[in-house]
């Protein structure tokens, strides 16, 4: 019969033996608040309600991407998206920076959505310190977790089926509640001060987003241009200008909005060349001009049999 561990513990306690020191002791967790706005933003994702989408059995699942300013409890930006990926998070980060300025630190967990090379490049370019919490130890994200609890208790119960008919409708209602109620209401963590009032106290310290923020946050990927000058990008076909066939180039695009212009750039060159979506029907009707020969290259075939011409002239002379 195996001896239970609890029996051994009770025996040791009965004889007054001290317990063994814990080998996995963690450092003390201290409550903190940064002194100025935009010193630290905490970001996380909450599962939102499902949209009432006709024709879909599971409905349209939504995800709430949110940023929370540590000093003022202002939410620089939060919105519902239809996917949980890095493209949606980076779009939300861009919207937050445009509305409330650029943070000095950004604190997230270790999910794949937050740990991308592209996000590291963005933060380095904007001079933002990117911080990830230790795996399985979500200390430091308590404020945004409490904000999500407040959303579940104060906002989600008032969402009606009519609001779930479309994502744009849901976000409009959400932003009205966020700006009109949450930001204007007294906050217990701010001694009764409203988050927006606290944020405005430090408005002179806000670092505005750069004018070229859209360009800075574009994704950069390497692509090989096909012999037909086609560039494949997220399931879409783009056409490069003449002279790029077979070359590996850098493609710059917005991963969240593929309707925005897409550009091509040669390695080591600052020039950006716009790519256009492939129109297969238009290409089928275009007249193709013969390509000029390169120096040292034989001329392209003309389709004329010169042996037949020589034979014809020979028989004409003999006759």
Image (cartoon, helix red, strand yellow):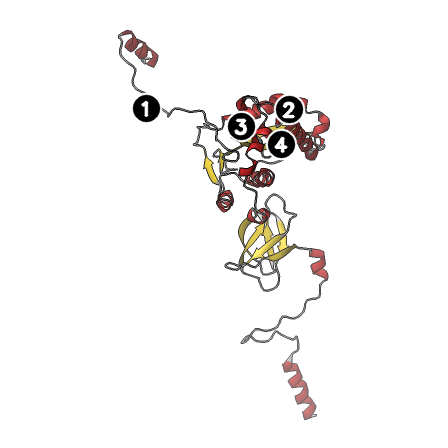
Decide: marks 2, 4 in contact (CB < 8 A)?
no
Crowding at dot 4, Cα within 10 Å, few <14 / some 14-19 / many 20+, comes out as many
Q: CA distance from mark 2 to mark 4?
A: 12 Å
Image quadrant in which you'd find residue 225: bottom right
Q: Position of residue 40 (x, y in %)?
A: 50, 34
Decide: marks 2, 1 in contact (CB < 8 A)?
no
Say whether residue 284 is visible.
yes
Q: CA distance from mark 3 to mark 4?
A: 18 Å
Q: Nearer the viewer, mark 3 or mark 2?
A: 3
Locate residue 117 relative to residue 5 in the image: left or right. right
Crowding at dot 2, Cα within 10 Å, few <14 / some 14-19 / many 20+, comes out as few
- Reading the chain from its start, which is encountered first: label 2 or label 4? 4
Q: CA distance from mark 1 to mark 4?
A: 42 Å
Give the labeled residue for mark 3.
Answer: 144
- Reading the chain from its start, which is encountered first: label 3 or label 4? 4
Give the labeled residue for mark 2.
Answer: 156
Give the labeled residue for mark 1.
Answer: 23
Q: CA distance from mark 3 to mark 2?
A: 16 Å
Give the labeled residue for mark 4.
Answer: 62
């Amino acid at each position: 019969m195996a001896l239970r561990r609890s029996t051994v513990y009770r025996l040791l306690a009965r004889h007054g033996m001290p317990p063994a020191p814990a080998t996995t002791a963690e450092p003390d967790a201290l409550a903190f608040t940064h002194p100025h706005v935009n010193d630290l933003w905490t970001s996380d994702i909450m599962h939102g309600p499902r949209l009432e989408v006709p024709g879909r059995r599971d409905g349209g699942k939504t995800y709430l991407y949110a940023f929370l300013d540590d000093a003022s409890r202002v939410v620089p930006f939060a919105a519902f998206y239809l996917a949980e990926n890095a493209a949606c998070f980076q779009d939300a980060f861009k919207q937050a920076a445009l509305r409330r300025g650029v943070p000095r630190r950004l604190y997230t967990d270790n999910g794949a959505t937050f740990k991308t090379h592209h996000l590291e490049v963005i933060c380095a370019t904007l001079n933002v310190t990117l911080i990830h919490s230790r795996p399985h130890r979500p200390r430091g994200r308590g404020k945004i977790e409490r904000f999500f609890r407040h959303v579940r208790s104060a906002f989600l119960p008032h969402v009606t089926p009519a609001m779930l008919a479309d994502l744009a409708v849901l976000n409009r209602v959400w932003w009205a509640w966020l700006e009109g109620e949450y930001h204007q209401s007294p906050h217990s963590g701010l001694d009764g001060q409203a988050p927006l009032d606290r944020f405005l106290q430090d408005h002179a310290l806000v670092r505005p987003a750069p004018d070229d923020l859209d360009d800075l946050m574009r994704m950069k990927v390497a692509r090989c241009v096909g012999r037909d000058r086609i560039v494949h990008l997220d399931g879409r076909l783009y056409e490069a200008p003449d002279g790029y066939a077979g070359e590996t180039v850098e493609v710059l695009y917005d991963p969240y909005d593929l309707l925005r212009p897409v550009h091509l750039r040669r390695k080591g060159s600052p020039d950006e060349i716009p790519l256009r979506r492939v129109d297969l029907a238009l290409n089928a009707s275009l007249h193709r001009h013969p390509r000029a020969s390169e120096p040292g290259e034989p001329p392209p075939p003309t389709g004329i049999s010169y042996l037949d011409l020589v034979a014809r002239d020979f028989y004409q002379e003999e006759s």
